[in-house]
Image (cartoon, rainbow, N blue to C red):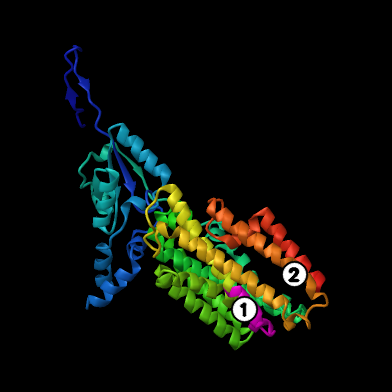
Amino acid sequence: MEQPAWSYDPGVSEPSATPAARTLVIDLEGALLRSELLMEALFSSPGRMLARFGAGGRPGMAALTAILAGARIDYAHLPYDPDVLNRALAARARGEKIYLVAARFAGHAAGIAAHLGFDGVVTPTDLAAGNLPFDRAAIERIDARNGNRASLKTWAKALRIYQYAKNTLVFVPVVTAHQMNLSTLGYALLAFLAFSACASGAYLMNDLLDLAADRQHPTKRHRALAAGDLPISSALWAIPLLWSLAVTASLFISPLFLGVLGAYLATTIAYSLALKRKMLVDVVTLAGLYSLRIVAGAVGAGVVLSEWLLIFSLFVFTSLALIKRFSELSMREGAGLADPSNRDYRITDLHVIAAMAAASAMNAVTVFSLYVSSSAVTPLYSRPWMLWLMTPLLLYWFGRALMMAHRRAMPDDPILYAFRDGPSRTAVAAMICIMLVAI
């Protein structure tokens, strides 16, 4: 039988037993870390990882593993489980030692342990064999949890279901061409579903590529992938599945529509990889992607696309994209943050961006006014003069959007803001009613 360690207390006549120091042992993956270390290494800097793999001259899993082991992971912003981390901090306050259990990427595990102020790292083999730097009989273990499945709410958040409101733009050509019959509306609905699946896959891909930047953002750090609510591996299989669904839906419409959807996806990928980091190129690209939804709606439903609608849309969406950038930068300014690392903008650009947004908005109103005064409205409307009532409503809505952004009262997406903001909804509903009466 083991004899307890004894210590002598001069104030006590008999020796007293000193209990062995407790040690908290935590599984890194599945317990402390709400993500997969392999995936974190891969997406810490995807471009750099691929470049190193291509230049390594040693293709294969061994080369990839070596590259990932040397990846630069931001340990400070990884998605740690708050309950486990709090238990560890409480144990540290009691003077207990804390060790992580990691089966792979020992260097990254040691880096995490050092960042959190833990005592070290052991492997599962060490734990099983008893080859440990602490007393095995005095440990408390927090091991990996089973069933790390994302909920439907988490999936809805990751797929950005709320962003599907933007895809209702595919119905605009059908409405403005006054071709609202069962056939055209059915094709427009199918186009809506195809764009929604395609966009969700693109959102997941964008969030994977932006993991590091999102985790340092005050609001984007709550996104499902950045927060560790959705496993990276789940997103990797969901992306091709969603794009396959989009292609399948497109094939029921027409090859031309599939081509438009392909152009949208290619542009979206280019935006995620490079274009969003280019000053103003990102704004023009966003405006083009919104307008491409309208083009797709016309192609899918088989209606003629009005050039007036296309020009008007380009100015509208350019203004909204600029307002979005203004909101993001003003938020960073209000929070005292530095210039964004993944955008080619500076906080000092705010005034220029606001001026350009206002100019684009006024150009959109001018284009609409020229359309109302043109001969193009006569065949479509029995009361074209009523469309003039929409001009002050457009001026009001754009002005309100700019003012709310300036007051930092608008989230970073003005289109979604229009669906949530009461006065904006009223203005849009009034414009729809005016257009219907004018018909």
**Local secondary structure at mark 1:** helix
- Where residue 345 sits, quadrant-wise, is bottom left
Residue that badge 1 annotates: 310
Indicate whether residue 316 is drawn in magenta. no
Q: Is residue 230 visible?
A: no
Q: Any mark on residue 388, and which?
A: 2
- Find residue 366 and report its horizontal and vertical position in percent: 64, 72
The residue segment tinted magenta is 297-314
Q: Is residue 327 visible?
A: yes
Q: Is residue 260 above or below residue 435?
A: below
- Find residue 250 and report its horizontal and vertical position in percent: 60, 81
- Depth check, front residue: 137 or 395: 395
Q: Is residue 312 above or below residue 401?
A: below
Figure quadrant of the N terminus: top left
- Depth check, front residue: 361 or 51: 361
- Depth check, front residue: 196 or 390: 390
Earlier in the chain: of badge 1 and badge 2, it is: 1
Residue type at numbered disc 1? Leu
Figure quadrant of the C terminus: bottom right
- Find residue 314 and report its horizontal and vertical position in percent: 57, 74
Answer left or right for 240 relative to 189.
Answer: left
Q: Mark 1, residues whose alpha carbon is within 10 Å: few (<14), some, or many (≥20)?
A: some
So how many labels did they put on this image? 2
Answer left or right for 72 relative to 421.
Answer: left
